[in-house]
Image: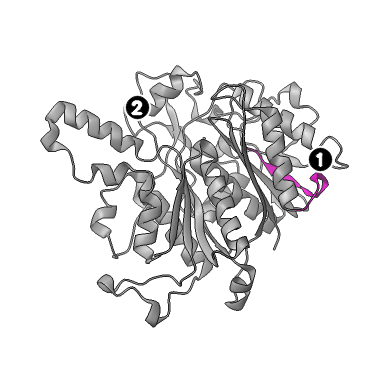
Amino acid sequence: MTGIGVVCPLGPTVDDLWQGLLGGRSGIVPLTRFDPGRFRSRCAGQIDDAVVTFPPGPFQFEIKRMSAFVRYALFAADRALEDSAFPPAADGDRNAEEARPSCPPGGAVFLGVAMGGLPSIEAGVLKQEQQGVRKTSPFLIPSLIPNMAASAIALRHGIEEEQMTIAGACASGAQALGQAMRAIRSGARTWALAGGVEAVTTPITYSGFEAMKALSRRDDPASTPRPFDRERDGMVVGEAAAVFVLEDRAHAEARGAVVHGELTGFATNGGCDGITAISPRHVARCMTGALADAAVSPDAIDCVFAHASGMVQGDAAELEALRSVTAEARRKPIVTSIKGHTGHTFAASGPMNLVGALMALRHQTVPPTLKLENPDPAFADMDIAREAHATEVRRCLVNASGFGGINAGLVVSRA
């Protein structure tokens, strides 16, 4: 991994995210995207749209009219390419159409998106019903289809090879990264842009999750969500995009790229006892599969960036799975969750955890689990970070789980 781009409730840069995690800064704020008065959950991890800007370039007119998830993904991809100092194509490989630059051949885009342009769907339906069908925007359909984020990245940067959108609920982004790794490992691709994005802070999201009793009812943004806390009462909706440049090792070395870390293991599976439940047995299988793919034992994992979103059953199921995976390990990994800082960013949650893991590897520090004040006694045997913890970090395990029994695990190592 040679490039990282992010935009999230803590800011538009990797440093904003990392300093927020270390400093215990929360990006959870009172909800302002719409009037939340009729809902019990009134907080969100919102992105400041003022920071999501683009220089003049191809498709500028269309991009301004896209759903937020498209703009956020494109912004993060731009930052990832800048961070990697990724070279443009040679003159002979440039896309002549509109004289726009293109990336070198051999690349691809893999992006995880769970709910896509849900705000555009809701707004489009309301406008049609209130003002008539002739008021429907011609940009409505392009704005809401889930593939448009990956497509916008490919179109803007002249990537004319493979682009793939993965919709695996909250595991989508982690799955996209794993598929990119597999494509490069197999030799099918030399490099890829991969990650996840979500922006669904809209009334229908809140009404749907409230009907499931999945959202925190706390009014104070400073007190919610509370991963692993015995008083946790649900998740908080968050917005984010995190995109990475992945390269074949020889390709990165040949151009003298700075390597942030190495993605060494990936596994994804399915299985649950209910369509929205997290199954400890199947999550454990996924973790074990990721470790096997990386050819390491549980002893080799120093830190786990947990999926934990503050859900009562979900947090418990994940730690039960981790307990079984590390039962015979001589040393237990430190566990942390970043969702107290950002909220649950759905398809972006795995990639957001991966950003945290890469920074932990760089700075040899595990960030704290924010708002964990009263640890659940059921987790007393687990080493859950409550403060920033300076320690040797060689490898991290990143977890992600989603509705429908989808799980994904990534192992990332120091370069």
- Which residue is more in the foreground, 301 or 177? 177
The disc labelled 2 sits on which kind of residue?
Pro
Which residue is depicted at the point 25% across and 48% down? 65
User: For this view, does 37 lie left or right of residue 190?
Assistant: left
**Range of magenta residues:** 295-307
Task: Say if the magenta span includes residue 27.
Answer: no
Say above or below: 34 vs 288: above
Residue 203's tag is: 2
User: For this view, does 376 lie left or right of residue 234?
Assistant: right
Quote the CA–CA distance across marks 2 and 1.
41 Å
- Expressed as whole percent of the image width and height from the top left, the position of residue 19 reads 58, 50
Which residue is depicted at the point 83% across and 46% down? 299
Look at the numbered discs 2 and 1 and tell me whether their residues touch, using CB distance below 8 Å. Answer: no
- Expressed as whole percent of the image width and height from the top left, the position of residue 399 reads 64, 41
Whichever of callouts 2 and 1 sits on the residue coming sooner in the sequence is 2
Q: Secondary structure at mark 2?
A: helix
Q: Secondary structure at mark 1?
A: loop
**Which of the image's four quarters has the C terminus?**
bottom right
Q: Badge 2: how crowded within 10 Å, few (<14), some, or many (20+)?
A: some
- Expressed as whole percent of the image width and height from the top left, the position of residue 190 reads 55, 67
Residue 7 in sight in this render: no
- Which residue is more in the foreground, 210 or 267? 267
- How many marks overall? 2
**Which of the image's four quarters has the N terminus?**
bottom right
User: For this view, does 276 lie left or right of residue 201?
Assistant: right
Residue 332's tag is: 1
Color scheme of the displayed model = one colour
Write down the quadrant of residue 384 in the picture.
Answer: top right
- Which residue is more in the foreground, 378 or 223? 378
- Which residue is more in the foreground, 163 or 59? 163
